[in-house]
Amino acid sequence: MHIRRAVESDFVAMWNIFHAVVATGDTYVFSPSTGREDAHVYWLSDDITTFVAEIKGNIVGFYKLIPNQRDLGSHVANASFMVSPTAHGKGVGKAMGEHCLVEAKKAGFEALQFNFVVSTNKTAVALWKKLGFAIVGTIPKAFKHQQLGNVDVYVMHRFLDDVAIPASS
Ligand SMILES: CC(C)(COP(=O)(O)OP(=O)(O)OC[C@H]1O[C@@H](n2cnc3c(N)ncnc32)[C@H](O)[C@@H]1OP(=O)(O)O)[C@@H](O)C(=O)NCCC(=O)NCCS
């Protein structure tokens, strides 16, 4: 697997994955009918740092890294992840999560915070815990899960003090 900075020509593959991920309405707030332009603004605006994961030249996932807040809250990062449903469970999310921690540290962030982890998204919650995140807050019934109705959302957080930047990075 190779993880690199996203470029504009990646968007065709990213859009297909985005569309498949939001179609199920169980992990992200995006409506299944979100359009290409909205998705493009979210993932590839100029002020956003986005990475794609490739296996044998095919994009299988991507993530973006941004400041969680402006100005006095900008020392904390925020990130969003999507893996192609056809590539789930192969370590892509874990590899991107580990990569993101290093990139966040390299960029000078002091912590990484996920603002909207759907509590029923067992894979994501387990993965983020494995990568050192703690649930620091629960927002009751904040997500309209398309099968389960309104479910809780977690805020997950991790300081980056212990993240080592590999020499090769
Ligand atoms: C959540 C997501 C990013 C995880 O990526 P992934 O590539 O599927 O996950 P990985 O293969 O890296 O697996 C990560 C861990 O989760 C575990 N896992 C995988 N599928 C699982 C499942 N269905 N249930 C429970 N655990 C699971 C794996 O065992 C693995 O742990 P391990 O390495 O110790 O074995 C991906 O599934 C995804 O894009 N989901 C839809 C969008 C989303 O939820 N984004 C995150 C929002 S917070």
Image (tube, grey):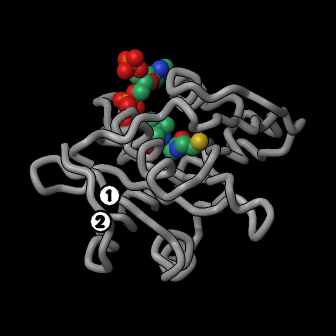
Q: Are marks 1 and 2 in contact (CB under 8 Å)?
A: yes
Give the residue displayed 29% in from the left and 65% down from the top. Answer: 13
Which residue is identified by label 2? 13
Give the residue displayed 77% in from the left and 59% down from the top. Answer: 73
Spot the residue most to the left.
56
Spot the residue most to the right.
140
Q: Nearer the viewer, residue 68 or 88?
A: 68
Asked whether residue 123 is in view, the answer is no
Q: Is residue 143 above or below residue 159?
A: below
- Measured as percent of width and height from the top left, residue 132 is found at 57, 25
Asked whether residue 95 is in view, the answer is yes
Quadrant of res 96 = top left
Mark 1 or 2 closer to N-term? 2
- Measured as percent of width and height from the top left, residue 155 is found at 75, 39
Q: Is residue 32 above or below residue 84?
A: below
Which residue is identified by label 1? 52
Left or right: residue 154 versus residue 88 is right
Classify the position of the N terminus by image quarter.
top left
Q: Is residue 138 above or below residue 167?
A: above
Amino acid at pointer 2:
Ala
Q: Nearer the viewer, residue 110 or 67?
A: 110
Disc 1 crowd, CA 10 A, few/some/many (<14, 14-19, 20+): many
Amino acid at pointer 1:
Val
Q: Secondary structure at mark 1?
A: strand
Q: Quadrant of ligand 1?
A: top left
- Measured as percent of width and height from the top left, residue 46 is found at 48, 82
